[in-house]
Each structure stands twice: as structure tokens, then as C-alpha cells.
Image (cartoon, rainbow, N blue to C red):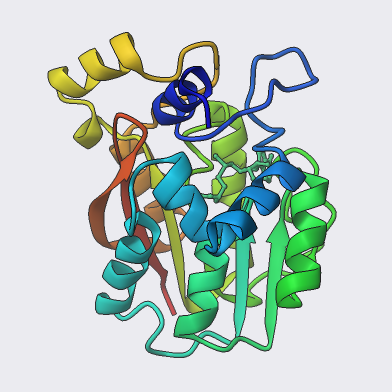
Amino acid sequence: MKSGVKRLLGRAGFDIVRSTNHLGGVDDFIPFEATVRAARAAGLSVGDYIDEVMNGTPGATQSTIDELSALGVFAANPNTVLEIGPGSGRYLEKTLKECAPDRYEIYETAEPWANYLTDTFGVVAQPTAGSSLAPTPDGSIDLVQAHKVFNTVTFLCASRYFFEMARVTRPGGRIVFDVMTETCLEPAAVGAWATQGGAGHDSYPAAMPRRTCVDLFAALGCSLEASFLAPMGVASTEVLVFRKGT
Ligand SMILES: C[S@@+](CC[C@H](N)C(=O)[O-])C[C@H]1O[C@@H](n2cnc3c(N)ncnc32)[C@H](O)[C@@H]1O
């Protein structure tokens, strides 16, 4: 990979293709064929290729999964899992090593990646539009997750998904996602973003106040169980783990 491109990947975390909606978003995600080809040539799974080569953070996805495992998120062997924005499936692949759900639904706007995930992992791709999980019934999912999604979309897109996530989770189920909260935004981190991160991508990185998330999910009957930091781009996001009340 030539240095200019690599520098961009390092800064943004992904080779982000400009959105066609002219809003400067990152909803097109990384190119499907080139990424799969490059991962194959490197002898790595697509997820490990993204961690190691594209992002320069080997083991980052596994370390989040390990934290979630230590918190007992997979201990109850969730039978239904729903993931928003799985992209290449790097978290999906590792989640399926931790548990064996009968049904794994995905909501993914990048069609080539959604097709790849259904073919490779037998997951169910649901029609994806805006921030709706309408095809999924209330209280039907044991584990709802999204990784590195809510720092790339607008406040309203993320907030609307939050209501939906609380709706589809069954009582006692878990909701896991990461957001770039104030915990991740100490002055040095803001400086790093301002000078090295996210150039040219208007909606990335998007911040989300931690208290907004905690208070909103509390109002929706879900309490914060745990949180931890995970690397993202030049700084980090905060992973929040909620449990819906029974
Ligand atoms: C930065 S990528 C993260 C992908 C993956 N979770 C990972 O960590 O490698 C954001 C993902 O969200 C998807 N996405 C963007 N807007 C979305 C929306 N409104 N609903 C569902 N997925 C969306 C993108 O296509 C992309 O796959």
C-alpha cells in the first residue's frame, strides 16, 4: 500500500469512500472487493486484516470482545443477536466464536458487505433505512450491539437507533455499543483529532455525551452495567454495556 493512501487509512481508521448523499458522511464504508482481496493476499481474515494492516491496531477487536466476555456478556449464551453496521464483520466473526445464537440479524447499509456476511456467516440481513429496526419485533433480542458506528453518523441517527435498540431488546438482555464520549476527549485527544484525525470526513468522528446515553437508556428501562475504552483512529471510543430490566 502506497504511503499517501496508508496515511489516510491510519488517520481515519478506514479507507472511507465518500457518501453519495453529499452530506459528507461515511456510510459507504470501505470498498468490498479490494479489501477482501488484500486480506486474502495477506493470509488474514478480513477482520484481522482491518485491525492489523488498515488500522495499525492489531488485536483491537479481540480486546473489546475479551472485555465483553470478562463482563459476562456472552455467558448466558445469547440465542438472538442483532448488530447494527457490522461492515466487514470483524466483531460479528469474533462474537460467533463466543456464542452460538440461533439467529443473528444485521442492519447494514453497505450492500456488498451485507451480502458477504449473509453468505459467509449465515446471518440475516434486514432491510436497512435510516435508523429503524422495524422488521425486528419488540423484546426479541438477547444481545444488541454496534461497534464503531455511532461515531460515524449524526447525533439524530444514533439517537433514533438508541430508542430502537431498547425496544427490540428482551427483558434481561444486553445492549453494547461504543461512542466517542467526553471520557475520550481530554485536551490531548481533541488536539490529536484536530491535527491528524478524520480529515475530509465531515461526520467522523462524531461525539456523543456519555450522560445523554446513560440517562436516555435509564429512561428506557436499561441500566449501565459497565464501560471501558477502546482504541479508535488517533484516540478512543467508550464502550457502554447496558442491561434491560426484567
Ligand atoms: C466505521 S464502519 C464500522 C464497521 C464495523 N462495525 C467495524 O467496526 O469494523 C460503520 C458501519 O456502519 C454502516 N452504517 C452507516 N450508516 C448506517 C445506518 N444508518 N444503519 C446501519 N449501518 C450503517 C457502514 O456501512 C459501516 O459498515
Give ligand 1's quarter of the image: top right
Q: Residue at the spot x=71%, y=69% of the render?
A: 105
In this image, 78 relative to 61: left or right?
right
Residue 147 on image: x %, y %:
48, 51
The picture quadrant where one finds residue 69 is: bottom left
In this image, 87 relative to 65: left or right?
right
Residue 2 on image: x %, y %:
52, 25
Residue 64 on image: x %, y %:
33, 61
Residue 143 on image: x %, y %:
52, 73
Q: Residue at the spot x=43%, y=60% of the render?
A: 176
Q: Is residue 21 above or below residue 166?
A: above
The picture quadrant where one finds residue 23 is: top right
In this image, 188 relative to 199: left or right?
left
Look at the image and tell me in which quarter the C terminus lies.
bottom left
The picture quadrant where one finds residue 233 is: top left
User: Is residue 146 visible in this depiction of the protein?
Assistant: no
User: Is residue 75 visible in this depiction of the protein?
Assistant: yes
Q: How many marks?
A: 0
- Front-most of 18 and 221? 18
Q: Residue at the spot x=80%, y=42% of the render?
A: 129
Q: Is residue 94 above or below residue 227?
A: below
Q: Residue at the spot x=36%, y=42% of the render?
A: 56
- Front-most of 202 and 143? 202
- Front-most of 189 and 164? 189
Q: Is residue 237 above or below residue 5?
A: below
Q: Is residue 102 above or below residue 167?
A: below
In this image, 214 relative to 123: left or right?
left
